[in-house]
Amino acid sequence: MKEFNITNQSSFRELQIIESLRTVLDPELQINVIDMGLVYNISAEPGSEEIRIEMTLSSSHCPMGEAILQSVKNRIETDFPGTDVHVQLVWEPQWTYENITEEGLKQLRR
């Protein structure tokens, strides 16, 4: 998970975005995209009306891939009105179960 850096003005906004994305679930595992480790990078410069999210899917054959990407975009547009949201799907590095956070693992075990 991204750490807060008080000297970086974009840290607070990026943490707000991370918390918003915790409401977007992977429909198969019912774990949010943050704890699944699907989000690789968030770019949200202070004063900019643009948010860029770089993320992956658990599989290139994920049947719900488009729905997940659209859910990410919709969530951020809802929580940050007036921003131009770009969600980029990447395949490198490849996602593995090691990407799942401790919280995500706890949710899997339930």
Image (cartoon, helix red, strand yellow):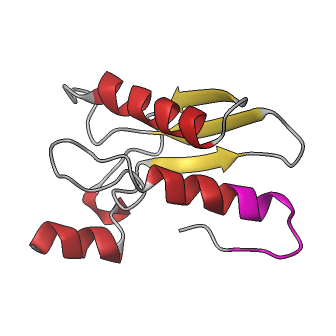
Give left or right: position of 94 versus 46: left
Residue 77, quarter of the rendered image: top right
Name the dominant secondary structure of the magenta segment.
Answer: loop
Measured as percent of width and height from the top left, residue 25 is found at: 30, 47
Measured as percent of width and height from the top left, residue 1 is found at: 53, 68
In front of the other: 43 or 23:
23
Is residue 29 depicted above or below 101 in this figure? Answer: above
- Quadrant including the C terminus: bottom left
Give left or right: position of 45 versus 75: right
Identify the residue at horizontal 60%, vertical 67% (top origin).
2
Is residue 100 depicted above or below 3 in this figure? Answer: above
Identify the residue at horizontal 21%, vertical 76% (top origin).
106
Measured as percent of width and height from the top left, residue 64 is found at: 23, 28
In front of the other: 44 or 94:
44
Tell me how many marks there are.
0
Measured as percent of width and height from the top left, residue 33 is found at: 38, 50
Extreme-left residue of the structure:
110
Q: Which residues are magenta?
A: 4-13
Identify the residue at horizontal 49%, vertical 38% (top origin).
75
Give left or right: position of 4 versus 74: right
Magenta-colored stretch includes residue 12: yes
In front of the other: 97 or 12:
12
Is residue 89 depicted above or below 23 in this figure? Answer: above
Is residue 37 depicted above or below 105 in this figure? Answer: above
Give left or right: position of 8 versus 69: right
